[in-house]
Amino acid sequence: MHERDKLLKSLYKKAEGYCVEETVTEFVYDEDGSKRAVREKTQNKYMPPDVTAAKFYLEFMDFKSELDNMSDDELEKEKRRLIALIKD
Protein backbone atom coordinates (compact mmCIF):
# COMPACT_ATOMS: atom_id res chain seq x y z
CA MET A 1 0.00 0.00 0.00
CA HIS A 2 1.38 3.40 -0.97
CA GLU A 3 1.97 6.03 1.71
CA ARG A 4 -0.70 8.21 0.06
CA ASP A 5 -3.23 5.39 0.33
CA LYS A 6 -2.40 4.92 4.01
CA LEU A 7 -2.83 8.63 4.59
CA LEU A 8 -6.19 8.69 2.79
CA LYS A 9 -7.38 5.68 4.77
CA SER A 10 -6.36 7.38 8.04
CA LEU A 11 -7.98 10.64 7.00
CA TYR A 12 -11.21 8.82 6.13
CA LYS A 13 -11.15 6.98 9.47
CA LYS A 14 -10.71 10.27 11.36
CA ALA A 15 -13.47 11.89 9.30
CA GLU A 16 -15.84 9.02 10.02
CA GLY A 17 -15.00 8.55 13.72
CA TYR A 18 -13.61 5.39 15.29
CA CYS A 19 -13.07 3.43 18.50
CA VAL A 20 -9.68 2.82 20.04
CA GLU A 21 -8.73 0.52 22.91
CA GLU A 22 -6.96 2.45 25.63
CA THR A 23 -5.07 0.96 28.58
CA VAL A 24 -4.51 3.10 31.66
CA THR A 25 -2.07 1.91 34.32
CA GLU A 26 -2.09 3.33 37.85
CA PHE A 27 1.23 3.38 39.69
CA VAL A 28 2.21 3.89 43.32
CA TYR A 29 5.58 4.41 44.97
CA ASP A 30 6.77 2.00 47.65
CA GLU A 31 8.50 3.10 50.86
CA ASP A 32 11.87 2.63 49.16
CA GLY A 33 10.82 4.94 46.29
CA SER A 34 10.37 2.30 43.58
CA LYS A 35 7.38 2.61 41.32
CA ARG A 36 5.03 -0.34 40.81
CA ALA A 37 1.79 -0.87 38.93
CA VAL A 38 -1.23 -1.48 41.14
CA ARG A 39 -4.09 -1.35 38.67
CA GLU A 40 -4.58 -1.58 34.94
CA LYS A 41 -7.79 -0.70 33.18
CA THR A 42 -8.59 -1.27 29.52
CA GLN A 43 -11.46 0.58 27.94
CA ASN A 44 -12.79 1.44 24.51
CA LYS A 45 -12.65 5.12 23.75
CA TYR A 46 -14.79 6.63 20.99
CA MET A 47 -13.15 9.27 18.84
CA PRO A 48 -15.96 11.32 17.24
CA PRO A 49 -15.97 12.31 13.56
CA ASP A 50 -13.69 15.20 12.71
CA VAL A 51 -15.29 17.82 10.45
CA THR A 52 -11.96 19.21 9.24
CA ALA A 53 -10.76 15.74 8.23
CA ALA A 54 -14.04 15.14 6.39
CA LYS A 55 -13.65 18.44 4.54
CA PHE A 56 -10.09 17.65 3.45
CA TYR A 57 -11.04 14.12 2.41
CA LEU A 58 -13.98 15.31 0.30
CA GLU A 59 -11.93 18.10 -1.28
CA PHE A 60 -9.15 15.67 -2.16
CA MET A 61 -11.56 13.14 -3.65
CA ASP A 62 -13.22 15.89 -5.71
CA PHE A 63 -9.80 17.12 -6.90
CA LYS A 64 -8.74 13.53 -7.67
CA SER A 65 -11.90 13.07 -9.72
CA GLU A 66 -11.07 16.22 -11.70
CA LEU A 67 -7.52 14.97 -12.32
CA ASP A 68 -8.78 11.58 -13.50
CA ASN A 69 -10.87 13.31 -16.17
CA MET A 70 -8.09 15.59 -17.47
CA SER A 71 -6.22 14.99 -20.69
CA ASP A 72 -2.43 14.76 -20.69
CA ASP A 73 -2.18 18.35 -21.95
CA GLU A 74 -4.50 19.59 -19.20
CA LEU A 75 -2.49 17.68 -16.57
CA GLU A 76 0.75 19.21 -17.85
CA LYS A 77 -0.80 22.70 -17.71
CA GLU A 78 -2.02 22.07 -14.14
CA LYS A 79 1.42 20.80 -13.14
CA ARG A 80 3.07 23.98 -14.45
CA ARG A 81 0.47 26.12 -12.65
CA LEU A 82 1.08 24.35 -9.32
CA ILE A 83 4.88 24.58 -9.69
CA ALA A 84 4.60 28.32 -10.35
CA LEU A 85 2.31 28.68 -7.33
CA ILE A 86 4.83 26.87 -5.11
CA LYS A 87 7.72 29.04 -6.33
CA ASP A 88 5.84 32.27 -5.54
Image (cartoon, rainbow, N blue to C red):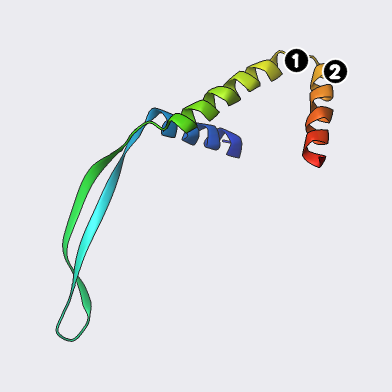
Amino acid at circle 2: Asp
Question: Can the viewer see residue 31 in this picture?
Answer: yes
Residue 56's image quarter?
top right
Q: In the visual, does 68 lie left or right of 24?
A: right
x, y percentage for residue 60? 59, 26
Q: Is residue 41 depicted above or below 79 in this figure?
A: below
x, y percentage for residue 76? 83, 24
Which residue is at the far bottom? Answer: 32
Q: Residue at x 18, y 58 (%)?
A: 40
Q: In the visual, does 82 lie left or right of 29?
A: right
The quadrant of the rendering that contains the C terminus is top right
Mark 1, other Cα within 10 Å: few <14 / some 14–19 / many ≥20: few
Location of mark 1 (residue):
70
Mark 1 element type: loop
- Give the label on residue 73, or none: 2
Q: Is residue 55 depicted above or below 29 in this figure?
A: above
